[in-house]
Amino acid sequence: MSTLIMTIQESMQRIGRQARSASHAMLRANDQQKALALETMARELDAQRNSLRAANKLDLEAGRTKQLAAPLLDRLTLSDRTIDTMIAGLRQIAKMADPVGSLTATSVRPNGMQVAQMRVPLGVIGIIYESRPNVTIDAAALCLKSGNATILRGGSEALHSNLALGKIIRTGLHAAGLPEHAVQVVDTPDRAAVGAMITMTDSIDVIIPRGGKELIKRLADEARVPMIKHLDGNCHVYVDSHADLRQAADIAFNAKTYRYGVCGAMETLLVHKDIAENFLPELGKRLVVHGVELRACSRGRVLLPKALLATDEDWATEYLGPILAIRVVDSIDEAIAHITRWGSGHTDSIVTEQIQAAQQFQREVDSSSVYVNLPTCFADGFEYGLGAEIGISTNRLHARGPVGLEGLTTLKWVLQGNGQIRG
């Protein structure tokens, strides 16, 4: 083992010990302290826009030199809009009810013993993510509000941005009198830091990865720490035979073009055969004018002459770019079967005016979020009223869908008595 790797492992172990100690101290943190920390971070984000943009510029210049793809550069950019969204998220989280210490309904046993469950932090959360520096603020805020300590390891492509955001986070912690190691940003781009984090079972309770398939696969193969995984977002919109076609066109267009690089972007459009002829040509023109490349099944190509012929690879692909797969289906059952076969369990939507179709779709599509008459790009914790999200879990355990405050806590049993003894 090289000296460098040994040094990184030793550094990560130190960070882990500091996080574990901070997690114990966070159990004593009150909601006023958490709110003050978050509000201070929000003010600092606003005040430090120029320095943040300067740090982000270094990352963007390096990214262009490395010829990062356009969607990755988009995720990497700290625009004024992105900073505004982070500020709004911080303030929304600050105002939300503190989940820590809340109790479920209490039951009373025949012997008078009171039994309930209390919501408590997970402990130390390690978050490994790529490209998006806004995750640094979102993750820090959610972990802080839910009483956890966190170790943040962003991608090397966002190192300057993440370190600048880390300074703002530390300012907030200091202002509120919270432990300085409650949020730590790993300052090395070396991948050995990731290898260390995913095996630190003594100091990290859960890993939340956010990134591409390669990162998730590596962590799934090598991690010893439990994970809340976010797999790819191969999202679908199905336009039913009973859809309002004008509404459906707006929904489908928004689902694809709102932002190509978000995990909730529509990647496949499914259209019922009965309305395809009246629906697809105009929508297709609108998408092509916007710069979207269409790849359609054989029936779809009859109505979309500019479309390429779609293959199985297209049905399986999360493009994160201006490409859309289109398939004409015979029924809602065929649409659901397609989603079951090719979907990633992230977010899928039906456009219909028939309540029975809507109910069937929401019941039978096994994804973390299932919509009726909405674009899939609403797959976002901020839009759900969670303030922000750490990711969108496609797990079945422990959290599913956008992971906000409640997803970063667990329950413990708390019992009260009056001297009862077990006979």
Image (cartoon, grey):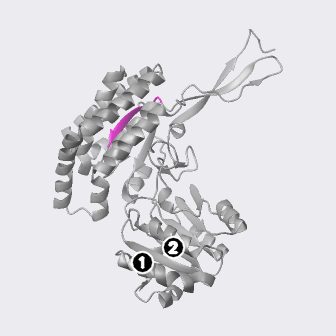
The residue at which mark 1 appears reads as 286
Locate residue 180, reporting x and y percent.
32, 24
Q: Is residue 342 left or right of residue 137?
A: right
Dots 2, 1 in contact, CB < 8 A: yes
Locate residue 212, reporting x and y percent.
38, 57
Q: What secondary structure is the stretch in magenta mostly built from?
A: strand
Locate residue 232, reporting x and y percent.
45, 60
Q: Is residue 299 above or below residue 134?
A: below
Disc 2 marks a residue whose amino acid type is Ala
Q: Secondary structure at mark 1?
A: helix
Q: Residue at x 56, y 43 (%)?
A: 398
Q: 167 or 303, which lies in front?
A: 303
Q: Which stretch is magenta? A: 147-153
The residue at which mark 2 appears reads as 249
Q: Is residue 83 above or below residue 25?
A: below
Q: Is residue 358 left or right of residue 27?
A: right
Q: Is residue 345 left or right of residue 132?
A: right
Q: Residue at x 31, y 33 (%)?
A: 43
Quadrant in the picture for the C terminus: top right
Q: Residue at x 44, y 68 (%)?
A: 256
Q: Can see residue 187?
A: no
Tell me if mark 2 has few (under 14), some (14-19) or many (20+) residues whose alpha carbon lies within 10 angstroms of its own: many
